[in-house]
Image (cartoon, rainbow, N blue to C red):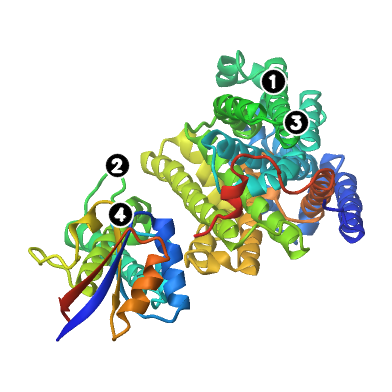
Amino acid sequence: MYTFSNRLKLGSIILMAVGLLGIIGGFVMAPGTVEEAKAMVAAHDDGHEAAASHDSENSHAAAASHEGDHSASHDEHLLDQLKNRPWAALYVAAFFFMMIALGVLAFYAIQRAAQAGWSPLLFRVMEGITAYLVPGGIIVFVILVLSVLHMNHLFIWMDADVVAHDELLQGKSGYLNPTFFLIRAAIFLGGWIAYREYSRKLSLKQDESNDNSNFKMNFRISAAFLVFYLISESIMSWDWIMSVEPHWFSTLFGWYIFASMFVSGITVIAMVTIYLKSKGYLPDVNDSHIHDLAKFMFGISIFWTYLWFSQFMLIWYSNIPEEVTYYVTRIEDYKLPFFGMVAMNFLFPLLLLMNSDYKRINWFVVMAGIVILAGHYMDIFNAIMPSTVGDQWFIGIPEIGAILFFAGLFIFWVFRALSTVPLQPKRNPFIEESRHFHY
Amino acid sequence: MASKVIQAFYNDDDVLMHAVKKVKAAKHHIEEVYCPFPVHGLDKAMGLAPTRIAITSFLYGCVGLTVAIVMMNFIMIKDWPQDIGGKPSFSYIENMPAFVPIMFELTVFFAAHLMVITFYLRSRLWPFKKAENPDVRTTDDHFVMEIEIHGNEQELKDLLAGTGAVEINISEKNSH
């Protein structure tokens, strides 16, 4: 039995407290009026106001702006962007940590459906991480509900005024409307959480039973869940991420977000496993298990890059205005995070984890994992921010505060879940194979 | 020089692995193990030096990447600049994304093919070479461990019989 150490508990609570202060600070610092917004930008950019309020062509106010004074609409747009910033920072971090749990859930379901022999020793770790899906998913859902209630302007298509002036959005309104949006979100989250809870229950029951009926049942529902997950994850990525830019679309976006959540999830499994091992738990987990997880981190990082580049190259090559705006904004206003993310998500894992021996060195895997997680946070950041805050982005108090808060909540929830049951499944039919797993 | 070797046959890779460990523990030098398929961890158990083929693979990949970069620069920018998809730029860097698939493919191509050729050279394999395996069954379902005899025939026989060998042969060998 793992006991949640007081130091870790205290650490996670401190993270949450500091993070909460940062989030509140972000909301307090957001400007309330156009004048405040202009003053902030003027102070911030040291007088380069003209450059700062220069508008990117595909951001929201372009659609939102009505007839009238051009510079006034710019200023209003600036205010909207600055008001969006704490919300967007909160949303990016909330989504990122929810996505880790969801990625782990997909990985877990694949292990179950494939009846993998190497991984059953890690099942309790994975189940512990997926426990975060409940609070994490609910928080994301609450943010979406608040968006529908017009507390923020993350999703421009929720604004009836904007839709009234936009024929494209009117054409999409059969799908992109607040009611259907929330119904979809509820179905997806409900399905994921239901599978997680049921599979966990069967997994625990298997330890106590005399036959393998729970194991077989788990196999069946995992296979069914993967079908549901594939569809729901794809639609979720259009709804929760792609729709912040409602004019733009990419057909492989679902896969792209999947690759991000999958590699982040596997990285967190490796990190939690290494942490628990360093504390003397999980005695049967050996370097070969870590090696396999690191192989997945390496492989899925390259898979992510493949999708990132496939999306980029087709759009860059065809150069169709309504598609290419996505990359024009990012390359003009987000050069460092946009290309830095590719270095963090591709070059680092490629070079650090290429050598087979390095995948067995635990601290090396943790270091590579930190870079990968930061890189995939940047991935979500780059997906949400350009359409919500435009060129007013910065990684400052609201962003870091939100990361710290959700990191604290994640650690607290995951390790609390890990401490409730024994860390090693007893009666999994493959447990012996997993114990003797060697490369 | 002809030498006498003892050949122990196994029909399972797990049994073979245990046998190799046992023979190594008894401080005998294993000349060779013939397998129908690669057995994970056998090289470590036999005490072979780690392979350096991964390093050659990385270097070949770098060669492939360089070839792709230089080749596309010559073909598409220098020798015969082409206007494809309305991108008539004479700059390499501005056309670079279009060349990435080629860079990737040539990196893989060079790494894979040159690594295989290196492996063949290093293992002294070429077409029409006479097979070295002592028994045709090692290409089907049997594993053969070969140990050179230095006047300790009976001792080796007893040791190998205790490791689960299905057959033990003594034969003359004309090599090395």
Q: Do the residues labelled 3 and 4 touch (CB within 8 Å)?
A: no
Question: Residue A328 at what x, y percent from top left?
Answer: 51, 46
Q: How crowded is mark 3: few (under 14 residues within 10 Å), some or many (20 or more)?
A: few
Task: Tell me which corner region of the image, top left, top right, bottom left or bottom right, holds residue B74.
Answer: bottom left
- Asked whether, in this view, residue A313 is left or right of residue B124, the answer is right
Inter-mark Cα distance, 3 to 4? 46 Å
Dot placed on the residue nearer the N-terminal end, 1 or 3: 1
Dot placed on the residue nearer the N-terminal end, 4 or 2: 2
Inter-mark Cα distance, 4 to 1? 42 Å
For marks 2 and 1, give the one nearer the viewer.
1
- Residue at the left extreme, as displayed: B128
Question: Residue A153 at what x, y percent from top left?
Answer: 75, 32
Residue bearing the label numbered 1: A187
Q: Do the residues labelled 4 and 2 touch (CB within 8 Å)?
A: no
Under circle 3, the secondary element is: helix
Residue bearing the label numbered 2: B85
Mark 2 is on which residue type?
Answer: Gly
Q: Please, is residue A333 above or below residue A257 in the view?
A: below
Q: Subunit of mark 3? A: A
- Asked whether, in this view, residue A281 is left or right of residue B168, the answer is right
Inter-mark Cα distance, 1 to 3? 21 Å
Q: Do the residues labelled 2 and 1 touch (CB within 8 Å)?
A: no
Mark 3 is on which residue type?
Answer: Lys
Residue B105 - label: 4
For marks 2 and 3, give the one nearer the viewer.
3
